[in-house]
Image: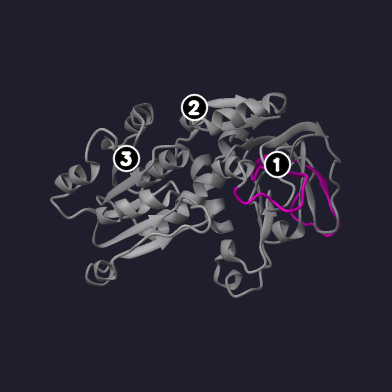
Amino acid sequence: MKAAVVHGKGDIRIEEYPTPAAGDGEVVVRTRVSGICATDIKTLLGQGLPKDLPTILGHEVVGEISEIGRGVEGLRIGDRVAVYPIAVCGNCYFCKRGRHNLCEHEFGLAHGIDGGFAEYVRLPKEIVNIGGVVKIPDSLSFEKAVLAEPLSCVYASLKTCKVEPGSVVVILGAGPMGLMHLKMAKWAGARVISVDLRDDRLKTAKNMGAEVCLNASAVDHIDEIRKITGGRGAETVIASLGIPGVIEQNLKLTRNGGTFNIFGGPPAGQTISVDPRWLHYGEINLTGTFAASPVQFTACLDLIARNEMAVEDLISDRFGLDNFLDAVERAKNQTMIRGIVVF
């Protein structure tokens, strides 16, 4: 099969690669669409590069089942499916409490096993057994369905922050994930303030429903948000980017009793300073969210299928495997909203 194969930092090649086969309890999916995530780009740049190379990245995958291993029930060859990408044990402390993304033995697509930037992808029994291969209704396109995975991560953040109708949500960063946070917060009935350094991204956020858009390089966005909120700050602040300095600078945007959520993955080894008196007397909830559970993944797929969440405007660019390197460059240079690879 043809695949985008990572050989090292900044070294990705379009080449022939062994086609996977389904073992007992496993499923092989013929990839139809794979989403390009910021995590993939950070990995290519050397952040968290897997030790076992070569490998295939890509954890946002939809397609058709092409092979089923012995013992798999409820699925058929030809089924249109979306893939929950985390392989979990199902038996550890966290799995038993429905927090599969924190599984003590987790691995997954592009994280221990080959991912979806390939014509075929093998799904281990740990994904199949937890219902991680979810059927897509015929009425739902693959292009829309592939956004269920990143949207479910945003949905998990929304649940952690307990966003309520009428509350003010500040979203730091109007990139692809920041725009998904915007859509999800609007769906929950919140008033959204988007903050970024680029006017083009803020224009997109405005078109998607942000009540206020602030360019932090042009205005004192902290002062502006305090004015908008009567000096109290926002009920929820979401850092959709993982820059420690930006996180630390914007903690003060959170009102007493509010929540600050670190959503974007920060680099290893960096720290932020937090005033413990502010945490204590302000009863601030400082949280992080990572990935989502299978239940949240399925819920978001259903949201898209029922047209409760418009996602088609998030897809700005489409690529094939043959020009996948162009996609990587555009993602690195932040010149697209969301790119997908269509097979």
- The residue positioned 24% from the left and 42% from the top of the image is 221
Amino acid type, residue under disc 1 in the picture: Gly
Residue 28 image point, x, y percent:
79, 46
- In 3D space, how far apart are the residues under numbered discs 2 and 3 (Cα atoms)? 18 Å
Label disc, if present, on residue 116 of the rendered structure: 1
Q: Nearer the viewer, residue 232 or 306?
A: 232
For the residue carrying disc 3, how many other residues have a C-alpha within 10 Å: few (<14), some (14-19), or many (20+)? many
- Label placed on residue 195: 3
The correct choice, above or below, for 1 with respect to 115 in the image is above
Answer with mark 1 or mark 2, whichever residue precedes in sequence.
1
Write the residue at 71% across / 45% down: 115
Upstream in sequence: badge 3 or badge 1: 1
Q: Quadrant of the N terminus?
A: top right
The three-letter amino acid code for the residue at tag 3 is Val
Q: Which residues are magenta?
A: 47-75
Q: Is 180 placed above or below 158 here?
A: above
**Rendering quarter of residue 86:** bottom right
Q: Which residue is mark 2?
A: 335
Category of crowding for the residue at label 1, using alpha-carbon neighbours closer than 10 angstroms: few (below 14), some (14–19), many (at least 20): many
For marks 1 and 2, give the CA distance: 23 Å
Report the number of discs.
Answer: 3
